[in-house]
Image (cartoon, grey):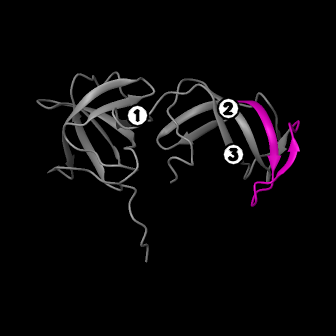
């Protein structure tokens, strides 16, 4: 039995799964609340485009909600944002409480699970981060580390391969909104 409390006290994060234009209603982003609480009237920031909008209403399974909490899959109507401006992979957060931001560089702890050959600086795989699906270039493999303990094994290795863990500097092909694992653990 899982007794963990939902992360209500953390800032709002809701990765967009899709965005719809509904006649008579307007623009409706859809996604699952990961942390925080979404309420009608919330002034929201949608990153990486840095669009600020107001949440007019929230629905889950065709029923109106007064709030959405972690785990809720919801659609929410927003003011003054077109369906063309928003897309899957964007992150929604409260503009007044640690809003999501765009980044052009990511420091990541990666574990290579199953990859033929070696991975060197310059390699550009596609990463999935929440609902974003984006190519990221390995700018620099900073260090190889132990998979379990995280202990540094080698500085600036020439390559990594299947079974290795490493700290790497990634550059996404276009802006993305990500947050430190320490601030927003899954």
Q: Residues within 10 Å of mark 2 (few under 14, many from 20)?
A: many
Report the front residue among 83 and 148: 148
Q: Which region of the structure is painted magenta?
A: 138-158
Q: Residues within 10 Å of mark 3 (few under 14, many from 20)?
A: some
Per the rendering, the mark at residue 99 is 1
Q: How many marks?
A: 3
**Residue that numbered label 2 is attached to:** 170
Mark closest to the chain's N terminus, 3 or 1: 1
Per the rendering, the mark at residue 109 is 3
Alpha carbon separation for disc pair 2 and 1: 22 Å
Q: Residues within 10 Å of mark 1 (few under 14, many from 20)?
A: some
- Residue 91 visible: yes
- Of all residues, the one furthest to the bottom in this rendering is 1
The residue at 79%/37% (across/down) is 142
Left or right? Give the position of 165 relative to 134.
Answer: right
The residue at 66%/41% (across/down) is 108
The quadrant of the picture occupied by the N terminus is: bottom left
Mark closest to the chain's N terminus, 3 or 2: 3
Left or right? Give the position of 148 relative to 185.
Answer: right
The residue at 88%/45% (across/down) is 154
Report the front residue among 157 and 93: 93
Mark closest to the chain's N terminus, 2 or 1: 1
């Amino acid at each position: 039995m899982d007794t963990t409390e939902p992360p209500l006290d953390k800032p709002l994060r809701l990765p967009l799964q899709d965005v719809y234009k509904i006649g008579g209603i307007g623009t409706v982003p859809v996604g699952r609340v990961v942390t925080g609480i979404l309420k009608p009237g919330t002034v929201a920031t949608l990153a990486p485009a840095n669009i600020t909008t107001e949440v007019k209403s929230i629905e889950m399974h065709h029923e109106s909600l007064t709030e959405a909490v972690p785990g809720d899959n919801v659609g929410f109507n927003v003011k003054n944002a077109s369906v063309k401006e928003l897309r899957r992979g964007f992150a929604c957060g409260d503009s007044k409480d640690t809003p999501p931001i765009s980044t052009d560089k990511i420091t990541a702890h990666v574990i290579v699970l199953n990859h033929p050959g070696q991975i060197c600086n310059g390699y550009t795989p596609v990463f999935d981060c929440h609902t974003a699906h984006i190519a990221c270039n390995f700018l620099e493999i900073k260090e190889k580390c132990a998979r379990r303990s995280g202990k540094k094994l080698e500085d600036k290795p020439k390559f990594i391969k299947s079974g290795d863990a490493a700290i790497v500097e990634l550059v996404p092909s276009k802006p993305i909104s990500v947050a430190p694992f320490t601030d927003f653990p899954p």
